[in-house]
Image (cartoon, helix red, strand yellow):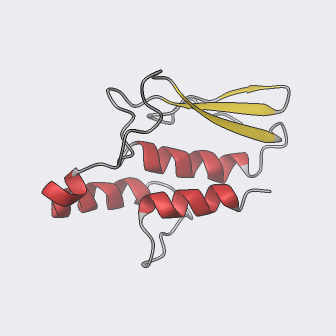
Amino acid sequence: MTYEELAGIRVAISDGVATVPIDNPPLNLADGTVGPSLRAFVARVRHDNDVRVIVFDSADPDFFIAHGDMGFITYPQAAIEAACAAIAAVPGAPVPPTMNLMQVVHEEVRALP
């Protein structure tokens, strides 16, 4: 499987281990770029027989994921519309109305085989 086009993350697979550095400068913000890319990664890796373990890492030594995108507070409508558009780009991956994007990503990672 390929993962090269996923924005905000990089994926390297070796000996059954997928190393996934978050790479969304300048702060590794959990935003409308990283969330949909993580969802797309999880949807694919679920069926990737070459991966047995996933290690999430950071490309920035000072931050893992700094925080969520504050645009959801300061510009809520624009941020929500942008995130919804990005989420819609992940085929077959609806977001339950009771969960936010990061909760969905966490649940999808937790449910991996």
With respect to residue 107, does 24 lie above or below? above
Q: Residue 1, located in which quarter of the rendered image?
A: top right
* Residue at (35, 27) in percent of width and height: 25
Taking 10 as reference, is 8 left or right? left
Nearest the camera: 33 or 29? 29
Taking 42 as reference, is 50 left or right? right
The residue sitting at the bottom extreme is 98
Nearest the camera: 89 or 15? 15
With respect to residue 32, does 107 lie above or below? below
Q: Position of residue 78 (x, y in %)?
A: 18, 57
Q: Residue 24, located in which quarter of the rendered image?
A: top left
Q: Position of residue 85 (x, y in %)?
A: 33, 57
**In the rendered view of the protein, which quadrant contains the C terminus?**
bottom right
Taking 109 as reference, is 22 left or right? left
* Residue at (50, 23) in percent of width and height: 59
Q: Residue 13, located in which quarter of the rendered image?
A: top right
* Residue at (80, 39) in percent of width and height: 51
Q: Position of residue 9 (x, y in %)?
A: 51, 33
Q: Position of residue 30 (x, y in %)?
A: 39, 45
The residue sitting at the left extreme is 74
* Residue at (66, 33) in percent of width and height: 2
Taking 102 as reference, is 13 left or right? right
Q: How many marks?
A: 0
The residue sitting at the front extreme is 62
With respect to residue 1, does 32 lie above or below? below
